[in-house]
Image (cartoon, rainbow, N blue to C red):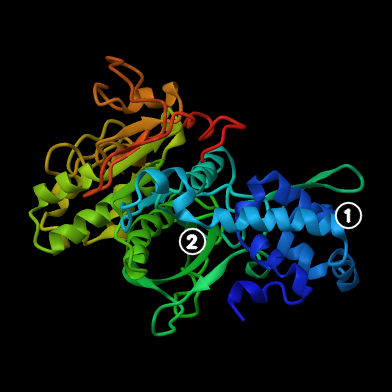
C-alpha cells in the first residue's frame, strides 16, 4: 500500500478517491472539494480544524458506508473526482498548452516558511502566505516548479483561549501521520539525503515531501539519531532562538536545499530566493561551479543570470545580520573550495559594525559585504523585485547605499513578483494577463486555464 494511502486505512471502495483527495493540498483552494469534505462529518471537520486526513481517520466507518450509498453525496463526489483527475494533467494547464515542448528544468523556489493550510503549521505570517500562494498559482498555471523549505515539526506557536477567558500560547506540533508529509529516503534506504558541514561537524539532513497540487514541496529536517544532540532540533521550530540558530537554519536551507535538489535528480533552470533567508543558496551554487573548474568571476556571473530575488520588508529591522566570527565558524572554510581567501569572502563595507557580516554576490566578480542577508540576495540575481512598491525601493540597483533611507531613490524594481521566469535553455514565458503578483499571486475569481 502506498505511503500516502496508509494514512487513511479504511474507506469504502466507492469512496476510495477520498484518500488521494485528502493527501494533496489542492483541495484546500477548491471550494467544491472543501464542501465535499465538510459534508462527511461537519462537527468532526470543525473539531479537526479542517484537516481531512485526521477527520477520515476518526470518522465512524458506518458514516462512510452511509455516504457510499447516498446519491446526492456521490454526485458531488464524482464531480470532485473529475476535477481532481483533470488537475493532475499538465497538458491542460496554461503553461502546458503554450509550451508543450518545454520541461525538465524547473523553477526552484526557496523560502523559510510556506503558508499552505493551517493543518501544516510551518508559517507565521505574510511571507509564508505569499510563498504558499506562489506554489498554488504555479500549480494552477502548470509551471515546472518545486518548493524548498524547512520542516519545523514543532511548528510556530498557537494561541488559545481557556474556559476562563485567559489567553495562553502553546506549540503547534506537526504530526506527519495526519498531514500529507511523506519521508523521502535515499536510493540505499538511508534516512538522510545529504550532509552539510557547519560549526566543525556534519549535519545529516532528512527530507519530507508533500504535493501542493502539481507542485512538490521538499522540507528539510535534522532530527536524526546520527546527528549531534544539539543539531537534532536545529530545524524543529520556526523563528525560534537567537541569531546563532537563525544563521544555522539559513545555512541549512540554502546549502542543504541545493544539495537535496541534486540528490533527487533535479537541475533547476531558475532559482528564486523569496526573501534573504535563502541567500546561502546562491553561495552554494557558486561553490559548485568553482569546484567543477569554473573561474570565480564566471561562476558569479552564471549564478546572477539564473537567479531571482523577492523582498518584503523595506526596513533594516526586518532582515538578518550575523556576527563575522559566527559566520566564519558556520560556513568555513567554504572560501577555500571557491578558490578565494577569507578576506575576499568577507571583504566590503561594514556601515554599522566592524564585526557584522552581510554577504553579497555583487555585479563585480567577488563577494562583497552589505547590510543584511537580503542584500546578499539582492547582489546576486539579475531580476529583483518587491512584493509591493515600498518593498521594492530599497533593493533598486540605483540605490546609493542599500538600506539607509537616504540618497537617490532611483527606479524601484517592479512590485510584481517575477512576471517572467527565465530558464536557462528555455524560451521566456511571460505570465498570463490574469495573473497579478501583488499582495497575492492572482485576483480572486480569475481562472488560470
58 left or right of 291 in image = right
Q: Dividing the picture into quarters, in which one does residue 304 lie? A: top left
Residue at 13% x, 64% y: name it. Answer: 292
* Residues tagged 1 and 2 counted as in contact (Cβ below 8 A): no
Q: Judge whether residue 37 can be spotted in this image.
A: no
Residue 351 percent across, percent down from the top left: 27, 31
Q: Nearer the viewer, residue 259 or 313?
A: 259
What whole-number distance in Å separates the C-alpha atoms at marks 1 and 2? 32 Å
Residue 2 position (above or below residue 369): below
**Camera-side mark, 1 or 2:** 1
Residue 133 position (above or below residue 41): above
Residue 129 percent across, percent down from the top left: 56, 41
The residue to which callout 2 is attached is 219
Q: In the rendered view of the protein, which quadrant contains the N terminus?
A: bottom right
Q: Nearer the viewer, residue 191 or 102?
A: 102
Residue 49 percent across, percent down from the top left: 77, 53
294 left or right of 303 in image = left
Residue at 29% x, 18% y: name it. Answer: 411
167 left or right of 145 in image = right
SS type, badge 1:
helix
Q: Dividing the picture into quarters, in which one does residue 23 lie? A: bottom right
Q: Nearer the viewer, residue 201 or 297?
A: 297
Residue 309 percent across, percent down from the top left: 34, 39
Q: Judge whether residue 316 can be spotted in this image.
A: yes
Q: How many C-alpha atoms fall within 10 Å of the one at disc 2: few (<14), some, or many (≥20)?
A: many
Q: How many C-alpha atoms fall within 10 Å of the one at disc 1: few (<14), some, or many (≥20)?
A: few
The residue to which callout 1 is attached is 43
SS type, badge 2:
strand
251 left or right of 168 in image = left
Instruction: Choose the circle earlier in sequence order: 1 or 2.
Output: 1
Amino acid at each position: 500500500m502506498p505511503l500516502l494511502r496508509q494514512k487513511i486505512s479504511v474507506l469504502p471502495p466507492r469512496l476510495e478517491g477520498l484518500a488521494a483527495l485528502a493527501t494533496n493540498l489542492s483541495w484546500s483552494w477548491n471550494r467544491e472539494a472543501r464542501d465535499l469534505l465538510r459534508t462527511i462529518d461537519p462537527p468532526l471537520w470543525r473539531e479537526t480544524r479542517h484537516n481531512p486526513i485526521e477527520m477520515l481517520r476518526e470518522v465512524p466507518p458506518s458514516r462512510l458506508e452511509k455516504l457510499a450509498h447516498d446519491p446526492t453525496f456521490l454526485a458531488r463526489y464524482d464531480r470532485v473526482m473529475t476535477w481532481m483527475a483533470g488537475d493532475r494533467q499538465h497538458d491542460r494547464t496554461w503553461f502546458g498548452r503554450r509550451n508543450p515542448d518545454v520541461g525538465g528544468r524547473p523553477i526552484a523556489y526557496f523560502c523559510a516558511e510556506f503558508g499552505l493550510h493551517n493543518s501544516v503549521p510551518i508559517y507565521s505570517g505574510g511571507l509564508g502566505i505569499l510563498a504558499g500562494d506562489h506554489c498554488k498559482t504555479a500549480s494552477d498555471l502548470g509551471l515546472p516548479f518545486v518548493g524548498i523549505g524547512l520542516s519545523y515539526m514543532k511548528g510556530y506557536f498557537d494561541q488559545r483561549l481557556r474556559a476562563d477567558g485567559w489567553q495562553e500560547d502553546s506549540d503547534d506540533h506537526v504530526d506527519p501521520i495526519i498531514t500529507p508529509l511523506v519521508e523521502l529516503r535515499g536510493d540505499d534506504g538511508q534516512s538522510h539525503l545529504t550532509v552539510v558541514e557547519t560549526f566543525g561537524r556534519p549535519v545529516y539532513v532528512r527530507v519530507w515531501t508533500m504535493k501542493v497540487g502539481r507542485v512538490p514541496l521538499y522540507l528539510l529536517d535534522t532530527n536524526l539519531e546520527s546527528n549531534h544532540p544539539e543539531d537534532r532540533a536545529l530545524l524543529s521550530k520556526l523563528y525560534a532562538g537567537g541569531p546563532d540558530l537563525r544563521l544555522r537554519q539559513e545555512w541549512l536551507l540554502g546549502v542543504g536545499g541545493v544539495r537535496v535538489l541534486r540528490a533527487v535528480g533535479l537541475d533547476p533552470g531558475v532559482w528564486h530566493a523569496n526573501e534573504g533567508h535563502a541567500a546561502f543558496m546562491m553561495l552554494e551554487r557558486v561553490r559548485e561551479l568553482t569546484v567543477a573548474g569554473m573561474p570565480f568571476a564566471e561562476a558569479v556571473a552564471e549564478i546572477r543570470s539564473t537567479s531571482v530575488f523577492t523582498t518584503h520588508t523595506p526596513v533594516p529591522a526586518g532582515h538578518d545580520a550575523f556576527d563575522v566570527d559566527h559566520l566564519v565558524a558556520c560556513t568555513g572554510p567554504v572560501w577555500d573550495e571557491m578558490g578565494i581567501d577569507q578576506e575576499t569572502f568577507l571583504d566590503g563595507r561594514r556601515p554599522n559594525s566592524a564585526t557584522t557580516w552581510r554577504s553579497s554576490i555583487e555585479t563585480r566578480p567577488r563577494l562583497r559585504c552589505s547590510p543584511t542577508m537580503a542584500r546578499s540576495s539582492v547582489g546576486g540575481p539579475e531580476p529583483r523585485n518587491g512584493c509591493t512598491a515600498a518593498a521594492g525601493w530599497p533593493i533598486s540597483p540605483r540605490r546609493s547605499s542599500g538600506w539607509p533611507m537616504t540618497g537617490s531613490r532611483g527606479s524601484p524594481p517592479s512590485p510584481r513578483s517575477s512576471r517572467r521566469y527565465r530558464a536557462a535553455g528555455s524560451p521566456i514565458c511571460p505570465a498570463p494577463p490574469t495573473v497579478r503578483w501583488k499582495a497575492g499571486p492572482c485576483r480572486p475569481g480569475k481562472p488560470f486555464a
